[in-house]
Amino acid sequence: MEKQRLQSVQALTNSKSIKMKAIWGYILLVFSVTTAVAQDGLIPPVEMQKIYQKVKTPYKYGLVMVPEDKEHKMDCPTIFKKGKDWYMTYLIFSGRGYETCLAKSKDLLHWENQGKIMSFNDSGQWDDNQKAGYNALLDIKWGGSYAVNQFDGKYWMSYFGGKEKGYEVEPLSIGMAYTSQHPSFAQEWKRLETPVLTSLDADVRWWENRNKLFKSTVIEDKKRLTGHRFVMYYNAVGDSLVNNKKTRWYERIGMAVSDDMVHWKRFKNNPVVHHPAGITGDAVIQQIGNHYVMFYFGAFWQDRNGSFNRFAVSKDLVNWTDWTGDNLIESSEKYDELYAHKSFVLKYKGVVYHFYCAVNKQDQRGIAVATSKDLGISKVNFVSETKN
């Protein structure tokens, strides 16, 4: 489960020798990667503080979506809007693997499941038992329409998939799914026959070479800041270069680009957001004025326990300045006391909604939300759990 993945990372980072080597490796990597950032793309602290004030959500409303039983686990919300209604795609883990589902809401607080949109197969395909999807080409304007847009007459969804049964069993690769009908309709999405990014590609980078590519977020680069129409941010497991030696299991966020949503190529040799230990992953992008804000989660860093949601800021989609202040979301309630992570953040009618994955100490996993204004307390609870 999620606990297994995070505990395996925690066990590694608890090693003092590896931790110290990782710190020095990170310092060398940061120096080599961010020299250009310091000259051209560094966001001043005063601007970072202004962004923080705009996105912070100190009020936890609580759980808004939970599984119907203890055997299933809910994860990774993506939110979009059509007309007066809101829609959420999310993941369900059943023990066999991940499937992708759809829910609907009128107020962002009360949600109803609409059904599956990417399901298991038994046809011998590369993604038979893992289909973890994330809607692509959303309107990323802060306080905007949050509509989902088309390209080439289709709506698109990136996903990580795999053929093996179980919890994130390698290899995991990134694929693309599509549909001609609006994503607000519960339907089984079509998928490209082969993945678009794998750990066996000829251009695979050192930070993603360990057979596990995870969440991806695809946006349109309307200004062609990257020289391409579409940008994908994704996290993966890869080596750590420490004194020219390799150590295992860190997750970092990197980039790929495309002009047709089908053919993708890596962009830059190094990750664009990373930390010297643990996980940096699950990027979600919002545009606030002339700033691009990447919400992401971290886990098991040297200076922070558990898991938590944070952000970084860029003006060119390539060079990112990391927020160094307080976490946006961290464990504080009974329903999220084990893990609080994996963001989707939006602003609607003056209120910021920060959706995240909440995991309790019984390893039950659901979708919770925190807000910038006090909207009360949710009545939703995990199965067989009394409210805190």
Image (cartoon, rainbow, N blue to C red):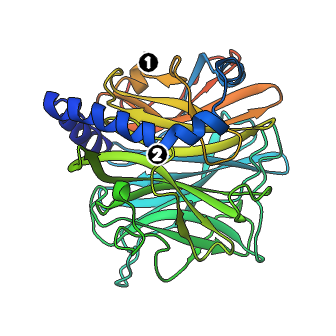
Which amino acid is tagged 1?
Glu
Lateral position of residue 145 relative to residue 258, left or right:
right
Mark 2 crowdedness (10 Å alpha carbons): few <14, some 14-19, many ≥20? many
- Asked if residue 342 shows in the view, the reply is no
Q: Residue at x 51, y 67 (%)?
A: 118
Mark 1 crowdedness (10 Å alpha carbons): few <14, some 14-19, many ≥20? some
Q: Residue at x 21, y 41 (%)?
A: 8
- The numbered dot on residue 75 is 2
Which amino acid is tagged 2?
Asp
- The numbered dot on residue 215 is none
Q: Is residue 226 above or below residue 67?
A: below
How far is disc 1 from disc 2 in space, using C-alphas?
Answer: 18 Å
Whole-percent x, y for residue 24 in the image: 28, 33
Q: Is residue 221 above or below residue 20?
A: below
Badge 1 or badge 2: first in the primary sequence: 2
Under circle 1, the secondary element is loop
Q: Residue at x 56, y 64 (%)?
A: 158
